[in-house]
Amino acid sequence: MSTERAGPATREPDDNPLLVVARFEGRNRLRVTGVIAVLFTLFGLMYVWLGPQMIEAGFSELIDAMPPVVTELFGFESLESIEGLLASEFYTLGWIVGLGGYLAYTAAGTVAGDLRDERMDTLVAAPVARRSVLLGKYLALLVPILVLNAVVPVVLYVASVAIDQTLPLADLAIVHAFSIPYLLFWSAIGLLLGVVVRRGRTAGRVALALVFFGWLAESIISTTDYEWLGGLSPMRYFDPSGVLVQGTYDVAGAGLLLAGAVLAVGLSQYWFQRRDL
């Protein structure tokens, strides 16, 4: 029995091919998006429920004894409030590394995997422009991005109210709004790698490694005399601690991430249109 995914259903003459591909790919992501949303929600709830006890336990002496690079890596300097705990732990490991890595990996795999298994030939053989196929796959990644950024903050806020540790709703919303350009950027990088590398697992692993290396490098460089080099890392432009703890908003950084995403998608389309499948 064949295990290949079916292609998009035959479209009506007036349907936009870009939206047809995006809807088809988006529907295929609904189930896994639901699973990921549950996992991230439970992960965040753990920090909300256990946060007050962790804060009362006191970490100041332990943190002071840690090397600066470790403190910078996880944002341990902000563990004196529930907001700081979420920013340094949940959003660092969950959003910056975890969700960013997942989106980069899955974007690379969905393109490179179709190229490897020759499913892409079927799509582009239909009267659909190559750029519509590629952009449709990219737009489908909005399903997990938007669902998680809508569900998770609401659950975290309600849970914080339930334990009388109410999180600032406006700042929480801004963190998740600013995370969208960051996640779109890594999705675009994964898309580009999928087109260039063409081997599904290899492209995904390279994308995942880039996310992890970007986070690690930016944290290490920030503790040296070459801090300015950290500006090359996307992680520099999404700072949950800055919003939740310090109340600062890096609008310019979000703009740079969006510009980077547009550039990466443009390069992906250029490469995809000019190479043999």
Image (tube, rainbow, N blue to C red):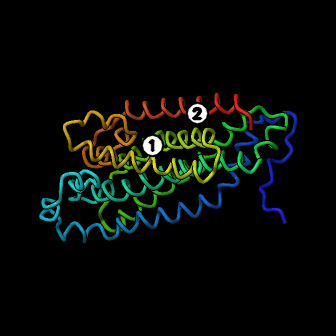
254 or 130, nearer to the observer: 130
Mark 1, residues whose alpha carbon is within 10 Å: few (<14), some, or many (≥20)?
A: some
Look at 85% across and 41% down and name the residue there: 11
Q: Earlier in the sequence, mark 1 or mark 2?
A: 1
Q: Amino acid at mark 2?
A: Val
**In the image, residue 19 lies at what x, y percent?**
73, 39
- Quadrant location of residue 56? bottom left
**In the image, residue 253 lies at what x, y percent?**
38, 33
Q: Label for residue 141?
A: none
Look at 62% across and 50% down and name the residue there: 109
Q: At numbered mark 1, what does the secondary structure look like: helix, strand or loop? A: helix
Q: Amino acid at mark 1?
A: Ala
How many numbered discs sit on the rendered protein?
2
Residue 83 lies left or right of residue 188; in this view the side is: left
Query: Looking at the picture, does residue 59 appear above or below residue 268?
Result: below
* Foreground disc of the pair 1, 2: 2
**In the image, residue 18 lies at what x, y percent?**
73, 36
- Quadrant location of residue 76? bottom left
12 or 165, nearer to the observer: 12
Query: Looking at the picture, does residue 139 appear above or below residue 204?
Result: above
239 or 65, nearer to the observer: 65
Real-space Cα distance between discs 1 and 2?
Answer: 21 Å
Mark 2, residues whose alpha carbon is within 10 Å: few (<14), some, or many (≥20)?
A: many
**In the image, residue 106 lies at what x, y percent?**
59, 51
Look at 19% across and 71% down and name the residue there: 57
Q: Are marks 1 and 2 in contact (CB under 8 Å)?
A: no
Where is mark 2, residue-wise?
Answer: 265
Q: At numbered mark 2, what does the secondary structure look like: helix, strand or loop? A: helix
Q: Label for residue 177?
A: 1
Residue 259 lies left or right of residue 138; in this view the side is: left
Q: Say which quadrant the C terminus sits in.
A: top right
Query: Looking at the picture, does residue 53 appear above or below residue 15?
Result: below
